[in-house]
Amino acid sequence: MAAAIETKKLTKSYKSRQHGLINVVEALDLHVEEGEIYGFLGPNGAGKTTTIKMLLGIIYPSSGLGYVLGKEIGDMDVHRMISYLPERPYYYEHMTGPEILRFYGSLFGISDEAKFQALLEKVNLHRDTTKSISQYSKGMQQRIGLAQSLINDPKLLFLDEPTGGLDPIAHREIRDLILSFRDEGRTVFISSHELSEVELICDRVAIIDRGIVKQQGKLTDLLRGGRIEITVTDIDKSIMNKLELADSSVREHPLGLLLDMPEDNEVNAVIDLVRSSKGKIVSIVPRKKRLEDLFVETVSVKPRSSSTEGVK
Amino acid sequence: MRPIIAIASTTVGEAIRRRVLLVILLLAIVLLVVAPGLGILSARSETTVLKGMMLGIIQLFSAVIAIVLTVYMIPNEIERRTIYTILSKPVQRWQFLVGKYLGAVAALALMMALMCVVLVVVFIIEHQDLAAVADVLKAPMMYFVQMSLLAAVAIFFSTFVAPLVNFFLTGGLFLLGSLFNPFFQTLQDNASTNPVAKNAAMIVNTILPNFSNYNIQNPIINPNSQIQNEKTYYISITFYGLCYITILLVAGIWVFDRREV
């Protein structure tokens, strides 16, 4: 599959009086395939927005290469095929929803009123056409933002914190819209802190910390290695040592014993063993590894080290 | 061209809704309306005082509007992040800057036109002399070129300095270019001037935008004072203004193109 985004050692540095040269993004290698929803995760100040701005050609890389839809970043032809929804976007407050779409449409030379109407319907704002943006709720502003980002029928959408600060209903509406973009064959690049959201919609993710990509891959691969909890009772204590397999633990539980083991261990063998010793299985609970666990494991809490902050 | 027009028209829409500008405009209109009543404070002819006062009000308030309108233009777009959604579309930075400038000039034209309407109405009520009104209106037309130049100075500075610094920088340049340009010109032309001072005066006079060119109220107010070849003079100072504006915009685009937003 062709790459929608490809970066090679993309780096952005800033000079600081106190710390010298700071690499906000360091040697970033990304590969985003066409038609997928790609989650770009990281704590505050990790370099997510800087990366997006570099990919959009709004700021210039210090070194490295970047390609968007096969063309070098900053190429104006690419801007016809992409769109961007910034974090907490602001639109000209005196405008109404249709006026916002007319304005952004005119930047592409698009003046198709039927298309604007269809977009308003898609984001469920077609009943609020006379309201000015200043009267819009946060969720409505985010939805008009998504509508403006679809004006040029983009192949690739950059969404920076698309659900930040929204209530659960607005969350769900935005999530459904993003999923519909994938169904329409678009590539979506999402920068977000909402890990549960990302886990639900993304095909692949990258976790960036202090400008460096720490993890990258398919969610199914990255989240492999969940655990299984088996609660047993009336078990013969003599088989206890047999139950303690590699990376497993056995501990007391109000109902008996709790066996905690990796999901890829031989669960059937353990069940057979319990049953052969006349023990009873009370429950088998698979505990899937969550993105939040992976994120916390990946993102260290140490202060900036010299690897990302060198004085020159 | 479409992106420039779209950005310019949005800029006009925003500008005419900015409360601070509307308050300045309202104050100017109030002063224009009460101007005939203030004529009694002067010993000079009532018509002379009225013309001078009204033109002074229009020039002063237009300058304030031009500066306030433009110094926040680019920084606000960056702070509110509207610039990101615009520059991520097929819009070049020069188109954005030119669109912003043209929008500012169009908004300025609207506000100055409103002040001129008030001037015309007040003047006709006071003097019922249409020919004199047409003569008086030449000054605001030249002020418009002057304010467009002032807006270009502010837009240029706004690409790399903070709004407050820009406010004082542009305001200072306006005062310097309006009040001291004739002084530098005299220094430059005077045969007895020290050569070093002469060269310095020439450099300052060339670099500094000559806002004093557009202060044509004297011949309008005082019938004894006249401009030689009036038409040629107006065309030449308009051409000077356009050239200077172009240079400032090109320099602004050069800076803005390299700036990280």
Image (cartoon, helix red, strand yellow):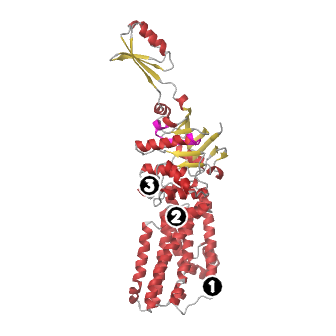
Residue A179 drawn in magenta:
no
Label 2: few (<14), some (14–19) or many (≥20) C-alpha neighbours in 10 Å: many
A200 to the left or right of A258: right
Q: Which segment did they paint magenta? A: A183-198
Does the rendering let one see residue B18? yes
Query: For mark 3, what is the residue?
Result: A128
The structure residue drawn at horizontal position 56% and vertical position 45%, both measured from the top left corner, is A157
Q: Give the letter of the chain under mark 1.
A: B
The structure residue drawn at horizontal position 46% and vertical position 26%, both measured from the top left corner, is A288
The structure residue drawn at horizontal position 43% and vertical position 77%, both measured from the top left corner, is B28
Label 3: few (<14), some (14–19) or many (≥20) C-alpha neighbours in 10 Å: some
Amino acid tagged 1: Lys
A23, above or below B83, in the image: above
Q: Please tell me whether mark 3 sits on a helix, a strand or a loop.
A: loop
- Of A249 and B198, nearer the camera is A249
Query: For mark 2, what is the residue?
Result: B11
Q: Nearer the viewer, mark 2 or mark 1?
A: 2
Query: For mark 1, what is the residue?
Result: B231
- How far apart are the two marked residues, 3 and 1, measured between alpha carbons? 54 Å
- Of B184 and B6, nearer the camera is B6
Give the image location of residue A256, x and y in percent.
35, 14
- How far apart are the two marked residues, 2 and 1, measured between alpha carbons? 33 Å
Q: Give the letter of the chain under mark 3.
A: A
